[in-house]
Image: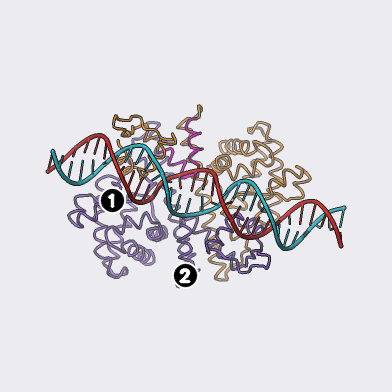
Chain colours: A purple, B orange, C cyan, D red
Amino acid sequence: MKVKEVSQMTGVSVRTLHHYDDIGLLVPDVLTEAGYRIYSEENLATLQQILFFRELGFSLKKIKELLSSPSFDRQEAFEMQRKMLIAKRQQLDEMIDTIEKTIRHEKGELRMTNEEKFQGFDFSTNPYEQEARDRWGDKAVDESKKKVAQFGPEVQEEMNRIYFNLAELRHTDPKSEKAQVAIKDWFDMLNNNFGTYSLEAFAGLGEMYVADERFTKNIDQFGEGLAEFMRDAMKTFAENN
Amino acid sequence: MKVKEVSQMTGVSVRTLHHYDDIGLLVPDVLTEAGYRIYSEENLATLQQILFFRELGFSLKKIKELLSSPSFDRQEAFEMQRKMLIAKRQQLDEMIDTIEKTIRHEKGELRMTNEEKFQGFDFSTNPYEQEARDRWGDKAVDESKKKVAQFGPEVQEEMNRIYFNLAELRHTDPKSEKAQVAIKDWFDMLNNNFGTYSLEAFAGLGEMYVADERFTKNIDQFGEGLAEFMRDAMKTFAENN
DNA sequence: CTTGACTCTCACGTTACGTCATAGTTTATT
DNA sequence: AATAAACTATGACGTAACGTGAGAGTCAAG
C-alpha cells in the first residue's frame, strides 16, 4: 500500500507518514526504485500501535524507544495500552464529575473550593514541605517544589504517608506482602477520594506513572525507580484481587 | 493570588500563565507596580473554563474567540463542555473496544480487517466519489478527496445517504420534523455501527462537529453550515427524546 | 542589611506536524 | 502512442504551545 491508501484507511496524513519514516518510527518495508514507500500489513499493525500510544500522550521519541526495545512484545503492549485507556477514561470521568459539580456550584446548589474546581486536570502530588524536608532533606524538596496539593489536608497527609512508605519499599519485591499492603492503601485512597477505580483502571494508572513524564518526575523525587515500583505493585495488586 | 500559587493549585505552569496573559487569553485582574500578576477569583473561574476547552482539543485561539464572544454564557458553556466530554468518553470507549478486538484478533479468536483496526481514531467521513460527483460536482469531490471511509460499503452508503439528505435540509429549521427524522437516522446509524451513544453523547458529538476543525471541514464540504445545522438538530433531538 | 524566594521580560529551543514549491513517476484518457 | 491527470518524492519554511535558561528587579524573613 502506498501513502494515499494508508492515509485514507487510517486517518493519518501523508505528511505524517513521511515524518514517521524520516524519524525512523515507521519505516515502510519496501522502497521502490522511484522512491515510493510501500507499506506492508506488518507496517499497518505497527501504525496501529503507534496511534494508540499517541492517543495516550506518548511522545514519538518514546514510542520509538518502546517499539525498538528488545523486550517489546506486541501482545503485552496491547494489554498495557488497554489498561491505560481505561485509566484515561477514569480521568475523564473525574472531569465530568468536576464539571457537573461546577454547574451545580454556579446554580448555588453546592459549594466548591477553588481547588476542587481543578480536580481531574492533574495527578501531580506533592508532600507537605516540612515533613518532606525532615525525611528526605532539603535537596529533594527543593527539586519538588512545583506544586502544592490540590486536595484537602487530610487527603494530602494520607497520600504523603503512603508515598513515604512505598518509597522505602521500592527496592523490595513489588509482589511481597508488605508492598501489596502498601499499594492497597494507595488503591483505597484513590477510591475514597477520586472516584471509583476498577482494578483495570488502577493497573492502567500505574502504567501511566511510568509512561507520562509528569508523573514519573514527581514520583521519582522520593526515590529513583519509585514510579516503576508502583507500577509493578499496582499491576500485581490488580491481578490478585 | 500570584503566579506560583495559581500554578500549584491548578497544575498550570507559570510559563503557561505568562503565555496566556501575553496572548490575551487570561489577563490577571490586577498588575502591581512591580509588574506582578494578581489573579482574582474571577480569573480562576475563567481558567477552569480554559482548561476544559483545552482538554477538549480547542486551540487557544478558538478558546479566546469563544470567551470574548458577546454571546458567551458561562453556564451554557459548561453544559456544552459537559456534553463534549461525554462524547469524548464515548470515543474512548470505541478505542477500548477496538483494542480489545485487536487483542482477540492477535490470539486468533476473531478476524479483523485493516480498516477495523483503525476504528475510533477518526470520525472523518467521505462519500462514494462517483455518487458525490454526480450530485455535487467535481469541485466538491476534489476538495474532499482526502480519505476514504474506514467502514464497510454498506455503512458507508448509509452514511452517504444521510449526509446528502441532511445537506439538503440545512437551510430549514433544525427543529422541523424533516430535520429531526433525518437526524434520527444519523443517531441510529451511529448506534448501529459505532457503539452505544447516549443522547448526551450524541449532543456532545454535535458540538464537536463544530468545535473541531477536522469535523467541520469534512462535513461542510457538502454545504456551508452543515456542521452547525447538524449540531443544532442533534441538540434538539437529544432534548426531545 | 543580607539572603533566599519569588517575579518579571526576553529569547532561543522543542515537538509534531501543516503548507507550499518543484520535480519525478504512475495511471487514466484521448 | 501521446497527453493529461493523479500520485509520489524531497526540501524547507511556518505554526502552535509552551519549556528552558539568562539576567535583573521585588518581596519577605532572618
According to the picture, the residue beneath numbered tag 2 turns out to be A72
Under mark 2, the amino acid is Phe
Label 1 element class:
loop
> Where residue A129 sits: x, y (%)?
22, 49
The N terminus of chain A: image quadrant: bottom right
Q: Which mark is residue A139?
A: none
Residue at 50%, 38% in the rendered image:
B61
| Residue at figure coordinates x 37%, y 54% from the top left | A214
Seen from the viewer's position, the closer of residues B161 and A146 is A146
Within-10-Å neighbours for mark 1: few <14, some 14–19, many 20+: many
Check residue A126 in the rendering and tell me which mark sits there, or answer none: 1
Q: Residue at the spot x=66%, y=51% of the render?
A: B146
Amino acid type at circle 1 is: Asn
Inter-mark Cα distance, 2 to 1 = 33 Å
Instruction: Give percent across and percent down for residue D29.
Output: 15, 41
At x 34%, y 53%, the residue is A191
Helix, strand or loop for the magenta stretch, by majority: helix
Judge from the rendering whether residue B28 lies leftward or rightward of residue A129; answer left or right: right
- B57 within the magenta span: yes
Callout 2: helix, strand or loop?
loop
Marks 2 and 1 on same chain:
yes
Is residue B128 visible to us here?
A: yes
- Residue placed furthest toward the bottom: A70
The tag earlier along the polypeptide, 2 or 1, is: 2
| Any part of residue A11 in sight | no
Q: Disc 2 sits on a residue from what chain?
A: A
Q: Quadrant of residue B206?
A: top right
Magenta residues, as a range? B48-68
